[in-house]
Amino acid sequence: PGERRSAEIGRVAFRAPLLLGGEAARVGLSCSSCHRNGRTNPDFHFPGVSGRPGTADVTTSILSSHRGDGTFNPKPIPDLAGDPSKRIVTRDRGKRDLEKFIQGLITKEFDGPEPPARVLDGIADYVRSIAPENCSGSELEVTASSIVEEVELALALARDEPDLATARLLIGAARSNLGRIDERFQLPALAADRQLLVEADGELRALQEGLGAPRERALWAQWEKDWPERRRQLEADGPRSLFSNALLKKL
């Protein structure tokens, strides 16, 4: 159970842009932007960072003030469930090599802040769990409901998290996912939904800032009172938003 919870924290952080900081956070990049579902991403293309799609220059000054080498040398994005013999760092749980490597990626390659220890351990545990036998190979459609579930997972973990820095990052990840929903609701007919998202984000911001304070319990109670109806409306309007493939094809 402890390992599973740690990997779930890591999975949430892996998908959160705020983990990386710097330019990456400003443009919405997360670990999963390059490693989609923890694997690779043949469609990834970032001007000035990528050559052909599916590549990235990890020593570019665009994303890092520490590792920029002044040379444009994009490399294929590795599959984290790929051949173990090709890994550049061991995943042996008895060692800390993977944690140190990930810490360097966050703080040096992307200029991110030092991650909380529990988040760093969680990302390492999540990466260790990525293996071909754990991947079904099937594709799942991205919907408003699927991202709502990501919001709720992050908040459930935050609610029970004793480390305040980790809990704040988890709530921040939930807020990022509200932003992902907002991106797909950019249609005139969905203005009410966008206002709903602004209000929900405001509650989570207050909760993020109020963790550990006497008002924390009241803030959680307010969120739990307001969220069910908000979720219902977002899920009901999802088919009318840019989550709809049919609607996207018409634009």
Image: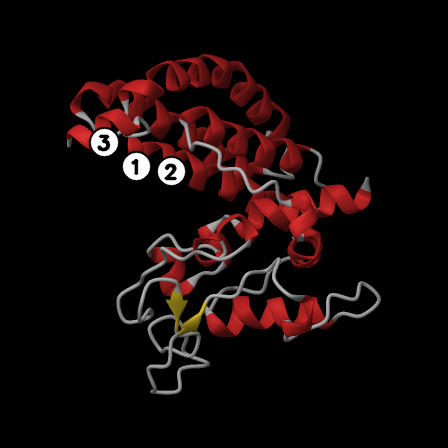
Asked whether the residues under the numbered discs 3 and 2 touch, taking CB atoms below 8 Å apart as contact, a structural biologist would say no
- Residue at mark 2: 180
Question: Who's the residue at 60% across and 38% down the image?
Answer: 211
Question: Who's the residue at 39% across and 68% down the image?
Answer: 55
| Disc sitting over residue 125 in the figure | none
Percent across and percent down for residue 42 are: 40, 57
Percent across and percent down for residue 139 are: 49, 37
Indicate the secondary structure of the residue bearing disc 2.
helix
User: Left or right: where does residue 135 sit relative to residue 62?
Assistant: right
Q: Quadrant of the C terminus?
A: top left
Instruction: Measure the C-alpha gap from mark 3 to mark 1.
Output: 13 Å
Badge 1: residue crowd in 10 Å (few <14, some 14–19, many ≥20)? some
- Residue type beneath disc 3: Leu
Question: Who's the residue at 34% across and 30% down the image?
Answer: 198
- Residue type beneath disc 1: Glu
Instruction: Give whichever of discs 3 and 1 has the lower sequence position.
Output: 1
Indicate the secondary structure of the residue bearing disc 1.
helix
- Residue at mark 3: 248
Query: Looking at the image, what colour scheme do you see?
Result: secondary structure
Badge 3: residue crowd in 10 Å (few <14, some 14–19, many ≥20)? few
Q: Quadrant of the N terminus?
A: top right
Instruction: Measure the C-alpha gap from mark 3 to mark 2.
Output: 16 Å
* The image quarter in which residue 72 lies: bottom left
User: Left or right: where does residue 89 sit relative to residue 150?
Assistant: right
- Residue at mark 1: 183
Which one is closest to the eye, mark 3 or mark 2? 3
Percent across and percent down for residue 239 are: 32, 19
User: Left or right: where does residue 83 sit relative to residue 111?
Assistant: right
